Image (tube, coloured by chain):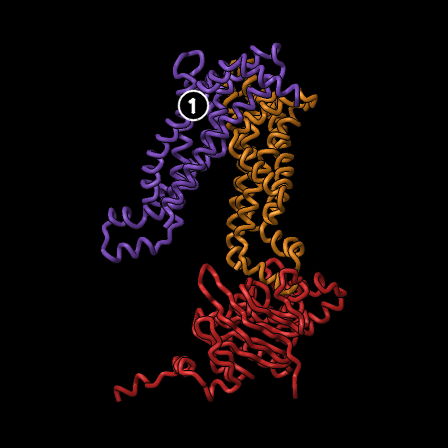
Chain colours: A orange, B red, C purple
Amino acid sequence: MDFVLIMKLIPIYKESIFLTLKLSLCAIMISLFLGIVCSAISYMKIPIVSWIIKFYVEISRNTPLTIQLFFLYFSLPLFGVRLSSFNCALFGLSFLGGSYMCEAVKGGFDSIKKTQIESGLSIGLNNWQLICHIILPQAIVLSMPLIAGVIVFLIKETSVAGIVALADVMFVTKDVIGMYYCTNEALFMLIVSYVVIILPFVLLFTFLKEKIKYIDNKILF
Amino acid sequence: MCKKIILEIFNLHKSFNGLHILKNISFDIHKGEVLVILGPSGSGKSTILRCINGFENIESGTIKFNGEVITTSKTKWELVRQKIGMVFQNYDLFPHMNVFENISLGPILVQKKNKSEVLENSRKLLERVGLLNRGDFFPHQLSGGQKQRVAIARALIMEPEILLFDEVTASLDPEMSREVLELIFELAEKGTTMIIVTHEMPFAKAINDRVLFLDDGEILENNSNFFNNPETEKAKRFLDIFEFKSHKNEKSD
Amino acid sequence: MNILSIGVLDFFVQEAVGFKRLLRAFCVNLYISLVSVLLSIFFGILFGFIVSKRKIFRIVFKIFLEIVRIIPIFAWLFLFYFKLSGKNGGLSGTAVSIIVFFVWGTFEFSDIILSSMEALPKHQYESGLAIGFTYKQLYKKIIMPQIMRMVLPNAINLIVRMIKTTSIVTLIGVIEVLKVGQQIIEYNVFKNPKAPFFVYGFIFALFFVACQTVSCFAKFFENKFKI
């Protein structure tokens, strides 16, 4: 293992790590927003929009991100829309992430006790007030573990973004191996990069999960 | 002495999954009256309360509240429920809000009252239920009895004309039940109109103005002297369930 | 939309062969999924039961599981591909994919079995033993039926994920549906500039149908298991 070469590779990988993180975080925020809105609409059973959302969730959950990205990257120019690699990857990731977040938040909605709803109704709240003040706050807290899972999932999915020529960790590794023939060093950096990106999130979420579980038994009885 | 009739129920029928749960229920309640509903499990007691408050659909029959029919499909239940308060068996306080917020949510959001006025009323109510120093606590920091008293305060602050209590001490141990029952007793003495579903016989005996005895979805008795003078056989047998004729140690003596 | 519809007809007439090629290439994806899934289920169940016996096994297992989970599958494929394949000969891309998917699948299945066993209330075990069951009878009559109900939805979820992930193997050079799709597009892009739309659209539909079919099987089995 050529450590001198590894030192040379660090700046390149640093760039790609930042890019991966930037892409992940943007995608996570858009997905979370999309997920909460879609979930709330499904929950309220608003007529036509709920069906569209159901359709959207089925489509994006049953097809791989790879094909969604290819579809976007190569088909959109035909309709006159030219997206940069980053925006294309972001669009694809958010599209996928939105449906996963929707399912995660839906899990939260489903775990709210029916009696909470009756409690709220019994003091005269209307449906809209019920959702804003009683249901939504509890649903989001209850769906935290699932949301955490989706976040880690999305960060890992960014590895595929390289197919739309985005200089993320995988793309850079491929390049580096091609240019310097240093398979071992590049693969080493690859592993290190992903551990650096994902491990903190996994540790954070495990810690939070334990903390919430402790409060869970008290808060959510 | 002719008190105003607040609630009238005519020929209520309710079925669920093919089971005829409520059969031809008819009764009314006067202002200031305490009506206790008794009966074996599954006789439909809670279901009646839930029908009054619009949590269950009915197959046929009418419910009139203050002379107005509330069992139409056009009923605006949010408005009705401001005047009919309900306290549930599992209290169901909102876990993400503290006691003050739980109580003041209704008046602020629904009755659109002034926030400082509402807080002042909440404070008075909390004092009345004996929990003034728990205002900033969260539900998970309270005992069962305290939670139930907050639930009662939450219903009271809406200034309802009638209060429904659905087996409110069923989840509590005897000590906590006592503090809740005493509060309900106080409210009764002040003239609050109530319908109470309970299994606590001594309490029911002490507080009732009238008893509705239900069995298998039908009203068997509508009696203002139920405990001393039950009219039907089934009622007599029901009251006997709570009595033990012999004492274990008597036999060995 | 008019231009699009002419494109579709054109495409169908001229490139029906293309669609057939895509279907055949999709079989490569399905083959990789099927082999990996079957191997993973078998070894996953075995592994899951073995690991559940001792606490130390469980701790070691969880550590390895997290290692497998932290690195994206694509990165694992890369890793194995460059080590086991490449210009030195060795395994084909397909073989490497199956190995990676098998390892991933086994860990995930074992985890599903383990979680289900942990989720089962302890008193189920105790009640059975108290009646005098042997361990074998206990597992057969009491534990397995209840675990299966918890395992099934998660297992189906995993299988669908594995089918979707086979789309990544194109990036290590396996000739499967995406690669063939790209070839078709390159060949046709001058004759028919709308080619990417139809080709990727078709592949999209293929994956969708495959995954939905598996999910539907799941619903069927779930109803069968419902007591």
Identify the residue at horizontal 62%, vertical 52% (top origin). A137
**Can residue A180 be seen in this snapshot?**
no
Give the left or right position of residue B172, taking residue A162 as reference. Answer: left
Up/down of B101 relative to A11, above or below: below
Please tell me in which quadrant of the rendered image residue B127 appears.
bottom right
Q: Mark 1 points at which residue?
A: C97
Helix, strand, or loop for circle 1?
helix
In the image, B61 versus A56, the foreground residue is: B61
In the image, C47 versus B109, the foreground residue is: B109
Count of labels in the image: 1
In the image, C180 versus B175, the foreground residue is: C180
Q: Residues within 10 Å of mark 1 (few under 14, many from 20)?
A: many
Identify the residue at horizontal 30%, vertical 83% (top origin). B248
Identify the residue at horizontal 54%, vertical 58% (top origin). A114
In the image, A125 versus C35, the foreground residue is: A125
**Can residue C79 be seen in this snapshot?**
yes
Residue B82: x %, y % from top left: 67, 67
Up/down of C35 relative to A57, above or below: above
Residue A206: x %, y % from top left: 51, 44
Q: What residue type is labelled 1?
A: Ser
Residue C1: x %, y % from top left: 66, 23
Please tell me in which quadrant of the rendered image residue C163 appears.
top left
Subunit of label 1: C
Up/down of A178 relative to B216, above or below: above
Residue C61: x %, y % from top left: 39, 38
Please tell me in which quadrant of the rendered image residue A220 appears.
bottom right
